[in-house]
Image (cartoon, grey):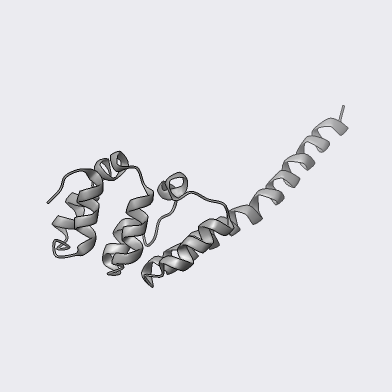
Amino acid sequence: MRLLPTLFCGAALSVAALVSPVAVADDQLAASMCDYVAADDKNRLRKVLSDYRLRLRNIYDGVVCNGESLIRHAFRSNAADVGEFIVKQLPGSAVGASGDIAWAEANGFTASPLLAVLKSRAGEGD
């Protein structure tokens, strides 16, 4: 009887050991994506998504750069090209519901070309 709890604890430890490297890899991947957005490097962002076989719409909510979404990070970094790429990868309904348009207008990004792309994708026009 005493052997069963010991085996059970050992299995839990081995599962935890397997999960940790994945979490670190995910953090590194997210950090790389944030760096590519800040550098306005659309090609490298596309490559990393392709290499890991990821769709931006599936992981968008899980990637946070300095406490902000990828779109907001693109606005703050003046990364219009990569911002446009991100917006086009997301469903229009998600773009409209995100609150990013109101956030951009409230934070002084009304002159950004990315705001026009965001409004167009959300179906708001100018």
Q: Depth check: give the residue in front, 6 or 97.
A: 97
Q: Residue furthest top?
A: 1
x and y, in percent, of residue 124 in the image: 16, 45
The answer to whether residue 41 is above or below residue 85 is below
Q: Position of residue 18 (x, y in %)?
A: 70, 49
Q: Residue at x 65, y 49 (%)?
A: 19
Q: Residue at x 30, y 69 (%)?
A: 77
Looking at the rendered image, the quarter that the N terminus falls into is top right
Q: Is residue 69 visible?
A: no
Q: Is residue 4 left or right of residue 103?
A: right
Identify the residue shown where x is 43% and y is 68%. Answer: 36
> Height in image: 14 above or below 105?
above
Q: Is residue 4 left or right of residue 29?
A: right
Q: Nearer the viewer, residue 50 or 15?
A: 50
Viewer-proximal residue among 121 and 36 = 121
Left/right placement of residue 30 relative to residue 74 reads right
Write down the quadrant of residue 41 in the picture: bottom left
- The residue at 19%/56% (across/down) is 116
Number of dots carrying numbers = 0
User: Dividing the picture into quarters, in which one does residue 70 lie?
Assistant: bottom left
**In screen coordinates, is 13 left or right of 41?**
right
Q: Nearer the viewer, residue 54 or 106?
A: 54
Residue 92 rendering spot, x and y as whole percentages: 29, 42
Q: Can I make out residue 96 in this image?
A: yes
- Give how far across and how far down residue 58 sits, in percent: 46, 44
